[in-house]
Image: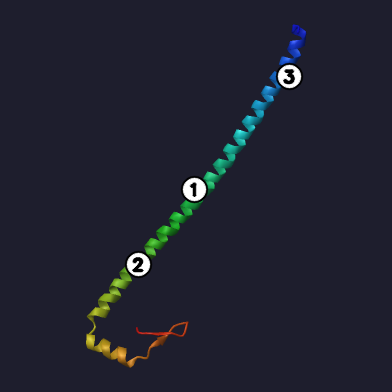
Amino acid sequence: MTLTHVLPVLGTLASLGAALVVVLAAYRTSAAKVWREEAEAQKTRADRLEESLKEINSRLSRIEIENERLVRLLTSLDPNKLAVIRLTSPPSEDAYGSTHDR
């Protein structure tokens, strides 16, 4: 083969190589964009869940404080009065129709 035959083949191969590089770069850029968007969505979701968890913890703390206060009030009552209240009040029914003591 002479130089005049080889140069067009090399030019074609170089063009195909350049096109392959451009396609791969576009794919990588597109994949990076997709992953970045996914990471941002996951971070937003994590931030939202963190806020929910903080709110739940705050509510739980308030419930624990209120529960502690109610236990103190209940234990400060006269046990004899509690027994009378239990004997005189009818058992309550829940949504399923079963009875239970208070």
Q: Secondary structure at mark 3?
A: helix
Quadrant in the rendering for residue 80:
bottom left
Q: Residue furthest right?
A: 5
Is 8 rendered above or below residue 54? above
Quarter of the N terminus within the rendering: top right
Q: Which colour scheme appears in the figure?
A: rainbow
Give the label, 2 or 1, closer to the camera: 1
Q: Are marks 2 and 1 in contact (CB under 8 Å)?
A: no
Tell me if 51 is positioned left or right of 36 in this view. left
Q: CA distance from mark 2 to mark 3?
A: 75 Å
In this figure, which residue is indicated by the disc labeled 3? 12
Badge 1: few (under 14), some or many (20 or more) residues near its Cα, within 10 Å?
few
In this figure, which residue is indicated by the disc labeled 2? 62
Q: CA distance from mark 3 to mark 1?
A: 46 Å
Quadrant in the rendering for residue 5:
top right
List x then y, in percent, for residue 11. 72, 16
First reached walking from the N terminus: tag 3 or tag 1: 3
List x then y, in percent, for residue 8. 76, 14
What residue type is disc 1 on? Answer: Lys
Name the residue at 56% across, 41% down: 35
Q: Which circle marks residue 86 in the picture? A: none
Name the residue at 32% across, 71% down: 66
Name the residue nearer the viewer: 8 or 48.
8
In this figure, which residue is indicated by the disc labeled 1? 43
What residue type is disc 2 on? Answer: Arg
